[in-house]
Amino acid sequence: MPARKPLNIGLVGYGFMSRAHSNAFLQAPRFFETEYQPALKAVCARNAERVKSFAQNWGYESVETDWRALVNRADIDLIDIASPNDTHAEIGIAAAQAGKMVLCEKPLGRNATESASMVSAVESERVANMVWYNYRRVPAVMLLKLLLDEGRFGRIFHYRAKFLQDWTISQELPQGGEGLWRLDADVAGSGVTGDLLAHCIDTALWLNGPLREVTAMTETFIKERKHNLTGRVEPVRIDDASAALGRFHNSALATFEATRYARGHKALYTLEINGGHASAMWDLHDLHRIQFFDHRDEGRLRGWRSIHVTDGDHPYMKRWWVPGLQIGYEHTFIHQFADFLTALSEGKEAAPTFRNALATDHVTDAILKSAKTGRWEPVSSVP
Ligand SMILES: NC(=O)c1ccc[n+]([C@@H]2O[C@H](COP(=O)([O-])OP(=O)(O)OC[C@H]3O[C@@H](n4cnc5c(N)ncnc54)[C@H](O)[C@@H]3O)[C@@H](O)[C@H]2O)c1
């Protein structure tokens, strides 16, 4: 094998996503043929002791405690942003202006205005960019995309998706600070709409094309919580639950729901598509299966098929073990990073780009707006 070109990575954050991304940087070149060899050059977070221990565990060569120092380092090619949503725009724009490739966690910005400024930065600096909407890279979800692109479903009538959790039901849970920044609107931008529904929308736009308009309701069930940073009881300004109806440009109807108040559900992302010929369902808790129904099957045998997406001719699966053996959540990040490296070698863009992710933010903005106005709201299109 010819020597691989080094790709020097600087990571921001040492939390949940930083672990998922670091694992992907290490595993992608082992399981996929890539021209590039990621080098874990530096990781940055504000707590020096903790960032050092993260660096040791994952094999980063050095640490920084100020992201500005990281972004300005001459020995870094790519900045990966895995810190909370309020940091994405500032770090992403500075990284692009320093000529670095930029990978960013979702949602891209706290709203579409912030995201649009990030799109302008990466496009005017012509740097490679990608947003970690990782569910596109579940082999079963990728299989759905291939089946849709082959036209097997016929005209699409319905697209419905839900993302259900239950971790914020307690009144005693504070808002803000480490681990709870998702409840602080200043940091998160919005509640479940930008956090969970954004995943449903990214997949929907990718599978079924753009949305034309939406109408929505949101609710904040617990109105006040102690703020971890101020110590005071303060109003909660995020949406705890969000439900939206929409119309796609292809005239299909959309139904979306996200909540952190569905007792018993921890991370239940489900989606279903109904077309004239066929329907399909997918469920994150059983992520290797799609349920598929084809009306054109012989009548006596017609029924729902449960397809275990683990065979060598299924997306990504020939890179892993033998047919029938499963992979998991972390592999979606490995696939996405491997796709990024392949695109880089081929001089192509790796989806979803910042521009693709801006389209999702336009939808979430329209949903939040409709929840306030009580009206149908148009979704701004992204050329
Ligand atoms: N793709 C997905 O499925 C998925 C899942 C979870 C989170 N996310 C996204 O990933 C991002 C991070 O979420 P998480 O769950 O990993 O959060 P987390 O709270 O586990 O980790 C956040 C990290 O950012 C660091 N940080 C905060 N401010 C910083 C600053 N100014 N400079 C440097 N480091 C800073 C913190 O120290 C921490 O290490 C968010 O944007 C979130 O929406 C995406």
Image (spheres, rainbow, N blue to C red):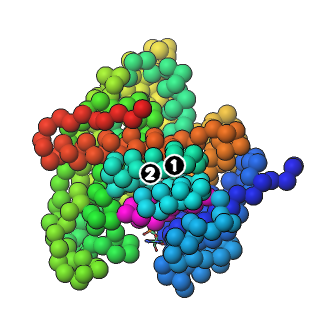
Q: Is residue 116 above or below residue 64?
A: above
Q: Nearer the viewer, residue 136 or 367?
A: 367
User: Which residues are the magenta region?
Assistant: 78-88
Q: Nearer the viewer, residue 8 or 307?
A: 8
**What element does badge 1 sit on?**
helix
Residue 97 appears in the figure:
yes
Q: Which amino acid does label 1 sit on?
A: Val
Q: Where is residue 157 shown, x and y percent of the image?
A: 33, 23
Label 2, label 1: how many angstroms apart (C-alpha)? 6 Å
Q: Residue furthest left?
A: 374
Residue 306 appears in the figure:
no
Is 369 on the left or on the right of 77, as rendered? left
Q: In this view, does 243 lie above or below 328?
A: above
Q: Is residue 343 magenta?
A: no
Is 209 on the left or on the right of 124, as rendered? left
Q: Nearer the viewer, residue 341 or 216?
A: 341
Which residue does the image show at 14% across and 48% down from the upper left?
372
Q: Which amino acid does label 2 sit on?
A: Met
